[in-house]
Amino acid sequence: MRIPLTHYFFSALNEFVAGFHPRSLPPMLRANYARELFSWLLLPLMLGAVEGGTMAIIVKKMFTGVEGVSAAQLDFVVAAVSAAPNIANLSSFVWASLAHGRTKIRFISALQLATCGCVAAIAAIPLNAVGLIALTLLIFIARIAWTGVITVRTAVWRNNYPRANRAIIAGKMAMVQAVVLAIGGFAIGETMDIAPGTFRFLFPALALAGFCGNTIYRKVRLRGQRRLQRAEQDGRARGEAQVDPRRLLALLREDRLYAKFMWWMSVFGLGNLMMGPPQVIVLNEQFHTSYLEGILATTVIPLMVMPLAIPAWSRFLSRTHVIAFRAVHGWTFVLASAAMWIACLAHSLEVMYFASVLLGLGFAGGSLAWNLGHHDFAPAHRDSEYMALHVTLNGLRGAVAPFVAVALYVPMAAAELGSWFFFICFLVNLMGLFGFISMKRLIPPRKSAEI
C-alpha cells in the first residue's frame, strides 16, 4: 500500500512544530524556555518597525520628493537608517558595564520598554525635513536600547541553558524571531502600499505587541543569579565594569586568537554591511519597486529563509568551533554579493530575490554565531565583556561601511558602473572568508567540561 506524499509532508511538519514544544527539552529548562519563546512571538513585531532593511525602504519612498530633502541627503539618510542597528552596537560596552552586577532580566525588560516607546513615537513625526530627522533619531535610540538587550541576553542564555542545548534553543528563538519579523515586514509593506498614512496607527499597534511580549519576558528567571551577581560585583571592585573602551582593547591583547578572529570578522563584515544601502537605492531607482516589493527583497525573503536553514546551522555549530563554522558559513554572503552584481547587470528583479534567499541562508547561520560564537573563547564570568567587544567592533564597521558604500556607489552609478559596486563587495567578502579558512588550523581543543 502506497503512502501519499502529503502524509510525509504533514508528518515532517508536525515533527518540526513539535520540536518547539517545551517537552522537547529537559524538564529543568522548560519553564524559562516557554516564557522566552512566547515573548519572542510578540517582541519581533515591535522590532520589525525599526528593522534596518524595512525602514530604509520606507524612508527612501516616503521622503522622496519631500520639500527640503534633496536626493543626495536622502541617500545618506538611507545609509544611516540601514546602518543604525550596527552603529548602535557601539553602545554595547556601555550596556555591558551598566548591567554588571545588576539583575539581568529586569535590566533587559527596561530596555525592551524603551524600544517600544520609540516605535510608538514614530507615529507622530511630520512628513517634512524635520520629520526625517526625528524619524532617524527615534530609530537610532530604539536600536541603541535594543543593543543592550542583545548584549545582556547572552549572559541569560549562558546561565539558563547548558552548552548541549544552547545552540538548539538559540536556533529556535532565532527561527521564531525571523518568521515574526517577516510577517511584520510583509504587513508593513502591504499596509504602506495601500495607504502610506496608516503608519500613524500601525506603529503604535506594533509597539503594543512589543509591550505584551515584554510582560511575558519579565517572568523569565535567571539560574544562578546570585552567584553571577557576586562574581560580577567582585569584578566591579577590581575595576572590570568601568565604562572604558580601553578595557576592550586590553582584551584584544590578552586573547590573541580572539583578536585575530575579530580582525577577519571585520574584513568579512565590511563587505556585508556595504551591500545594504546601495541595494535599497537600486531597488527604488533601477527596479522601481513598491513598498512591498522592496521590503520583500531587503527583509521578508531573507527572514522567511532563515527558519528553514537555522536547524542545520545550529546542529553544525553545536559540534564545531565558531572559526570552522565561519569558514563554511561565509560562502553564503560571498555568493549573495555575486548574485546582486549579476542582478544589476542583467536588470533582473528575480535574481535580486535569489540574492535575498542567499542572504537569508547567511543571516540564519550568522544569527547563531553572533549570539553564541564568543562562548568558544570567553570564560563564563567574562561572557558579557567578550560579547561587548564583538558587538562594539561590529558597530565600528557598521558606522563606516554604509556611508562608504553610498559615497562609492553614487559616483559609480553616475558613470553607469553601479552594478560593479557589488563586485567590490564580493571581493571583500571573499577575502574575509579566506581569512577564516586560514584560521582553522589554530582552533584549540574544546573543553568537554564546559557547561
Image (cartoon, helix red, strand yellow):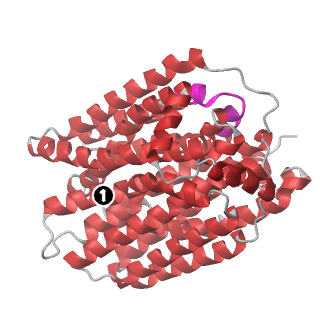
- Regarding residue 36, the answer to whether it shows in the image is yes
Q: Is residue 315 magenta?
A: yes
Which residue position holds label 1? 80
Q: In the picture, residue 130 is in which quadrant?
A: bottom left
Within 10 angstroms of label 1, few (less than 14), some, or many (20 or more) residues?
Answer: many
Q: Which of 393 and 254 is in front in this view?
A: 254
Tally the marks. 1
Residue 235, compared with residue 136, is above or below; it is above
Q: Is residue 308 magenta?
A: no
Expressed as whole percent of the image width and height from the top left, the position of residue 280 reads 30, 54
Furthest toward the left, the residue is 415
Q: Which amino acid does label 1 sit on?
A: Ala
Furthest toward the top, the residue is 441
Quadrant that contains the N terminus:
top right
Expressed as whole percent of the image width and height from the top left, the position of residue 264 reads 44, 29
Describe residue 54's horizontal placement relative to residue 71 as left or right. right
Q: Nearer the viewer, residue 249 or 50?
A: 249
Prevailing secondary structure of the magenta residues: helix
Q: What stretch is highlighted in magenta?
A: 314-328
Residue at 78 percent across and 34 percent down: it is: 450
Residue at 53 percent across and 71 percent down: it is: 46
Residue at 40 percent across and 54 percent down: it is: 298
- Regarding residue 10, the answer to whether it shows in the image is no
Residue 8, compared with residue 73, is above or below; it is above
Describe residue 402's horizontal placement relative to residue 448 as left or right. left
Describe residue 313's horizontal placement relative to residue 57 as left or right. right
Quadrant that contains the C terminus:
top right
Describe residue 271's horizontal placement relative to residue 312 as left or right. left
Badge 1 element: helix
Residue at 70 percent across and 36 percent down: it is: 315
Expressed as whole percent of the image width and height from the top left, the position of residue 427 reads 32, 27
Expressed as whole percent of the image width and height from the top left, the position of residue 348 reads 30, 44
